[in-house]
Image: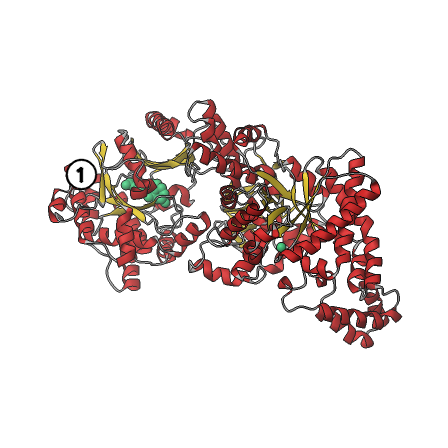
Amino acid sequence: MATQTLPETMEVSESKPATKYVYFFGGGKADGNGKMKDELGGKGAGLAEMTNAGLPVPPGFTIQTDACREYMRTGGVSHEVDQQMEDALARLEKLQGQKLGKGDNPLLVSVRSGAKFSMPGMMDTILNLGLNDQSVEALARLSNNPRFANDSYRRLIQMFGNVVLDIEKSAFDEVFDAKKKQKKARLDTDLDAKALKEVIEEYKKVVKKHTRRDFPQDPHEQLIMARDAVFRSWNNDRAKHYRRINNISDDLGTAVNVQAMVFGNLGETSGTGVGFTRNPATGAKEFYGEFLMNAQGEDVVAGIRTPVHILELQKIMPDVYNQLREITTRLEKHYRDMQDFEFTIQDRKLYMLQTRNGKRTGRAAVRIAIQMVEEGLITKEEAIFRVEPNQLYDFLVPRLDEKKSKIEVLATGLPASPGAAVGQIVFTADEAVAKANGGKNPVILVRGETTPEDIHGMEVAKGILTSRGGMTSHAAVVTRGMGKCCVAGAGDIVVDEKKREMRVKGQTFKEGDWISLDGTTGRVIKGKLGTLDASPDDPELQKLMGWSEPFRTMKVRANADIPRDAIQARTFGAEGIGLCRTEHMFFGEKKIPHMRAMILADNEKDRRAALKKLLPMQRDDFAGVFKAMDGLPVTIRTLDPPLHEFLPRREELTVDLALLPSYDSKQKKGLVAKYKDYGVKAVGDLKRVLSGLLARVEQLHEFNPMLGLRGCRLGITYPEITEMQARAIFEAAVDCTKKGIKVHPEVMIPLVATLKEMTNQAAIVRRVAEEVLKEKGTRIDYLVGTMIELPRAALVADEIAKEAEFFSFGTNDLTQTTFGFSRDDVAKILTTYLADGILKQDPFAVLDREGVGQLVKMATERGRKTRGKLKVGICGEHGGEPSSVEFCYQTGLDYVSCSPFRVLTARLAAAQAAASEKLKVEGGRTK
Ligand code: ADP
Ligand code: MG
Ligand code: MG
């Protein structure tokens, strides 16, 4: 196929086989094809494929990603790249019968970036390249439309100035807006040719001022500069950031597409638009999209004018509409996936400019996958991979009810935290608290950006809306943690905190006005919509899960400490509890005084007395969880955190004690109430109790509590704690069994580093278990195992497995101790590390396969060497993260355990991991 192109190049590099850097498309045929995303990028591959399919695509050529990688290595491109580009340009000029930026009928091109995966962080497209002071006149004469010509030229200077010459957009916007004001123009299209000419002159001054040189008039120079800017954009901050959060390799590089221009801004018989072959929000099988007449490029999405629904096109130009439907239907059939397409109409003639697999919400992903199976387009096995496991979260949060009313979208921001929220606007955190009135009134907190001082308002609000900030802004991160709906960075909204109003689309909203947020799509909607509850039992979801579940071999459990969470997890399909943290049970109002008495005791006798009071309460806790998980295994971890977490802070205590003599009686009474759990009954007790308390707090104080007296070290120091917990577990188990509940207790010893630690604690648990069972005259099968969360434990896993009947990887601590990162302090370091690419991902979110993962692998292998059928699982945060779940599957773990809301995600991720091995599919997911 190379024979028809680039004969000169072949001659130049006789010695080694020439790399084909440039791929031509046009005249019904393309050098490349749709499979070549690695070389041509998604956009280039799509253009080639559409050309080969005979669709109306403006001709052009793609400079492949290899040239970008070369540019990154050497800071330039080789002679071959330049040469091949010149040849392709010559071929394009010949095909079009035009010359780039020259003559009576000048060729103009767009320069478009396009990597293997679509990346919104990369360079903006440059349109109308080739225009200069001469060719703009030619274009005006040729089109008989000077307004159009000047409009195209001013756009070029603006885009080129911004993306190639790095001049702030605002520098151009100021000029443009001033001109609109001066001419009393409301819309961009109200400016006439003369006004635009004046804009051009001022734009040129802006360029000169910022770069100290004139806007380049030579079309070839424009082209080379634009090409190199695309290459450089691969490494701009936005692009790097996007790659990081989407787990895309930094080494891929981008392709550059140079394509003959077609014009949607030629008048009222021209236009441009975007669309989807199915509704990307709901998945409904309906043609979905928007367009604008007499517009170019990004006008549709830029929000300058309000775009029109694509169905209107049917009325305006039925032929074009039908052709577009026919083409996009064909594209969907061809790619066997929902398509997201871009088109331009030039004087009633349709051109396709892009097609790709469209992004969609989780609900849409499920619906489209099922419908495509029903339509015979894909198989059930393929359908499993059409949904990103993380997207299933959409089914677990409420959503807006959009059926009943016609909705007005005010703005679209980032879908920072999924779900829906409907409420009355408030502008400060304090107002939120006041107006919410203890949760009686739904409020939405609207801010420019949130800060840590807003937390109390965020807690009571139904949803959060910010006009600035990205997916990792304070608002986004905090709301995701709270499981609360958030739309962040809705840039079209002006939040005036002083005037307490928000302005958008020419409308003003005051405190108390109703708005609705869709955190799944980022839409801000006017008025009070209804909401629909979460629907984990959605029939379509169940259907898809029904297809994927047979492939799953690894179990999915939940981390749950209380019956309510356990019950919820079960409805999401949890097959047991992988981590029940007993310490959370001690914080209850009734328990904490006894817990504190236990910690304050300086002798075993007092400690046992306090533990005795805790015993029945713990037993009830465990019974509740066993009941909820009837028939399924429950892993209970013995006490893990350092004890001082249950006591007042040292600094606070010191202050209270020091100020005590100067307090009046009211203040002293306050202290009595504050310290009543520590045995203060009257003012007279204060001095004695507080000094005693301080002394004990001093004793327990640790410089690094995370590496201090915690985990099994506690149970070894105070064996009576482990004894009490074991007794509570087995008494509860026996009681439940008597009621016909099937219990499978698994007692887990935390933070073990040596065999002897394990032996020590396992001996206590087994002894107490046997005592209880003997007392009650029954038998219950149970396991005693350990958490692997220290590198040493992984190293001696074969030893530890002599005592431990199961392993569960506590990958939060294991990540902490393997990296030597403190989880509480790592945030500062991570920001730099991620920005500089020292770490690709946060290892606390995504399991570090190369390091921590190797310990997981090693410990599993060594443990099973000792105990062939050793049950192995994971219970860190990673247990619900798809890539980590995949790793666990590949490592041969028996189960993953995660928070209840991630159970569905983990189930699908585990099924996909197994299915992709069995079916030998790779990366079948929609990206
Ligand atoms: P993105 O990757 O941001 O979608 P594109 O390269 O697709 O950027 O360009 C954005 C828009 O620019 C297209 O949707 C189209 O409207 C316009 N465009 C790009 N190339 C051309 C062209 N050759 N002729 C007319 N319009 C074009
Ligand atoms: Mg595009
Ligand atoms: Mg731990």
Is 766 in front, or is 547? 766
Quarter of the rendering occupied by the C terminus: top left
Q: Look at 49% across and 27% down and name the residue there.
A: 370
Residue 98 left/right relative to 789: left
> Is the residue marked 1 within 8 Å of ligand 1, measured from its CB?
no
Question: Where residue 697 sits: x, y (%)?
Answer: 74, 68
Residue 263 left/right relative to 509: left
> How many callouts does the rendering have?
1
Residue 118 left/right relative to 687: left
Question: Where residue 30 sits: x, y (%)?
Answer: 23, 35
Is 277 in front, or is 156? 277
Quarter of the rendering occupied by the N terminus: top left
Q: Look at 80% across and 34% down and name the residue there.
A: 739
Residue 117: name its quadrant. Answer: top left
Q: Is residue 787 visible?
A: yes
Residue 430 left/right relative to 333: right
Is 381 in front, or is 769? 769
Q: How is the image coloured?
A: secondary structure
Q: Is residue 471 visible?
A: no
Q: Which residue is mark 1?
A: 2
Residue 311 vertical position relative to residue 909 in the rendered view, above or below: above
Give the class, few, some or many, for how many residues have Cα within 10 Å of label 1's Cα (few <14, many ≥20).
few
Question: Where residue 133 sits: x, y (%)?
Answer: 20, 52
Residue 398 vertical position relative to residue 86 in the rendered view, above or below: above
Kind of residue at disc 1: Ala
For numbered disc 1, what is the local secondary structure?
A: helix
Q: Look at 81% across and 77% down and name the residue there.
A: 662
Looking at the rendering, the quadrant in which ligand 3 lies is bottom right
